[in-house]
């Protein structure tokens, strides 16, 4: 039986595309194992899928001055040693990496053992972890045509992002019942990301009295971000993070407010959900979400509010604008022509695995 090791972690966006690949990999006859950090979100997300999970030491490689820059390289070196030991024993035919800093020691260890690696870069501009892996990658998958120019010649493949098929199979009534909502009032779904988005959470909660006049709001606010003072608010339901029932919440949602991480917005595009994006500002990131959001806005898929401009009045006004014009956004997304990402990526994996045998 062919063997594959999946890796990626740190945020849900570095894990969910791997999860989306699982059914196709199993149908193709692969034995699958996952490598992540000891206690990262990837371990929690993978737990439901009956996969062997191996945790390794990991450290963040930062572009800025931080006292942890002195200790984290040693954690990465330890992670490399742990990954090399496991890969040498398991002997996979191929490694597929979704990025995040935990993936660096895995990919580099695989290269030392001559195990081919396929990398997926979600954002328009490549992240540092993936950049460190480019020299040893067999192929590099990406979401945006603009990204192709930033990748090593001969390695780049435009695949799009793998989307979990079950997200399109939700039950609206189940979602309404889960939240205690009525079917007679439209629903806004707020996605703060797996780690939460403090400024988005605050903006939505500040606007709640006005939003709840016309909408119901389900809020995925991130770990430890529940506001206990709002638990009894009619028409407002909070969750830290949702896994199995996410498809039902998407089926229920008329509009979505979200950050602009590449995997999140690719899911919104695949589900054709009219959306309002509040990208992470450049001061808090490397600016990839700003580029992602600008691309979606230019294609007519999204309304964008920059966080620096975010006010209660603007948020409420843009939500109403989005709702009034929701059909035009749905139509634009329907014309986008989604790529069959899973099939394309599986072909690359098969080619790499076959070349090794």
Image (tube, rainbow, N blue to C red):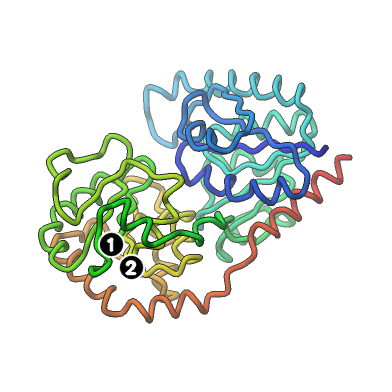
Task: Give the side of residue 93 with respect to residue 282, left or right.
Answer: right
Crowding at label 1, few (<14), some or many (≥20) Cα neighbours within 10 Å? Answer: many
Residue 46 lies in quadrant: top right
**In terms of secondary structure, where does tag 1 sit?**
strand
Which labelled disc corresponds to residue 84? none
Question: Measured from the top left, where is residue 340 in percent x and y?
Answer: 64, 64
The reply to whether dot 2 and dot 1 touch (C-beta < 8 Å) is: yes
The answer to whether 74 is drawn above or below residue 278 in the figure is above
Task: Give the side of residue 114 with respect to residue 147, left or right.
Answer: right
Question: Looking at this view, is 92 or 2 the one in front?
Answer: 2
In percent of the image, x 32 and y 51: which residue is there? 178
In percent of the image, x 57 and y 74: which residue is there? 337
In percent of the image, x 49 and y 57: which residue is there? 167
Question: Looking at this view, is 238 or 68 the one in front?
Answer: 238
Residue 63 lies in quadrant: top left
Question: Looking at this view, is 66 or 34 the one in front?
Answer: 34
Residue 303 lies in quadrant: bottom left
Task: Give the side of residue 356 with respect to residue 115, left or right.
Answer: right
**In terms of secondary structure, where does tag 2 sit?**
loop
Question: Looking at this view, is 56 or 252 the one in front?
Answer: 252
Which labelled disc corresponds to residue 254? 2
Crowding at label 2, few (<14), some or many (≥20) Cα neighbours within 10 Å? Answer: some
Which labelled disc corresponds to residue 188? 1
Task: Give the side of residue 157 with respect to residue 328, left or right.
Answer: right
């Amino acid at each position: 039986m062919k063997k594959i090791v999946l890796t990626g972690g740190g945020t849900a966006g570095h894990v969910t595309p791997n999860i989306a690949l699982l059914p196709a990999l199993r149908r193709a006859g692969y034995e699958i194992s996952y490598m992540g950090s000891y206690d990262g979100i990837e371990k929690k997300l993978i737990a439901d899928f009956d996969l062997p999970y191996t945790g390794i030491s990991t450290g963040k490689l930062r572009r800025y001055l931080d006292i942890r820059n002195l200790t984290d390289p040693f954690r990465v070196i330890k992670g490399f040693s742990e990954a090399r030991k496991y890969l040498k024993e398991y002997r996979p035919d191929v490694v597929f990496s979704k990025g995040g800093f935990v993936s660096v020691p895995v990919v580099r260890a695989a290269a030392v053992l001559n195990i081919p690696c396929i990398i997926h870069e979600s954002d328009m501009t490549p992240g540092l972890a993936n950049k460190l892996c480019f020299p040893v990658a067999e192929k590099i998958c990406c979401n945006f045509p603009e990204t192709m120019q930033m990748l090593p010649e001969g390695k780049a493949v435009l695949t799009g992002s793998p989307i979990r098929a079950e997200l399109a199979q939700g039950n609206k009534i189940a979602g309404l019942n889960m939240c205690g909502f009525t079917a007679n009032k439209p629903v806004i779904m707020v996605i703060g990301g797996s780690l939460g988005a403090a400024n988005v959470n605050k903006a939505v909660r500040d606007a709640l009295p006005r939003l709840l006049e016309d909408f119901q709001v389900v809020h995925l606010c991130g770990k430890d971000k529940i506001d206990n003072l709002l638990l009894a608010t009619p028409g407002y339901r909070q969750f830290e993070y949702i896994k199995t029932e996410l498809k039902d919440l998407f089926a229920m949602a008329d509009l979505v407010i979200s950050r602009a991480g590449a995997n999140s917005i690719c899911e919104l595009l695949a589900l054709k959900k009219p959306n309002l994006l509040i990208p992470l500002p450049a001061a808090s990131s490397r600016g990839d979400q700003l580029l992602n959001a600008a691309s979606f806005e230019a294609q007519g898929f999204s309304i964008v509010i920059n966080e620096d401009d975010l006010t209660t009045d603007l948020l409420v006004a843009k939500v109403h604008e989005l709702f009034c014009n929701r059909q035009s956004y749905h139509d634009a997304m329907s014309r986008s022509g989604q790529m069959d990402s899973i099939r394309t990526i599986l072909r690359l994996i098969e080619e790499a695995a076959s070349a090794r045998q």
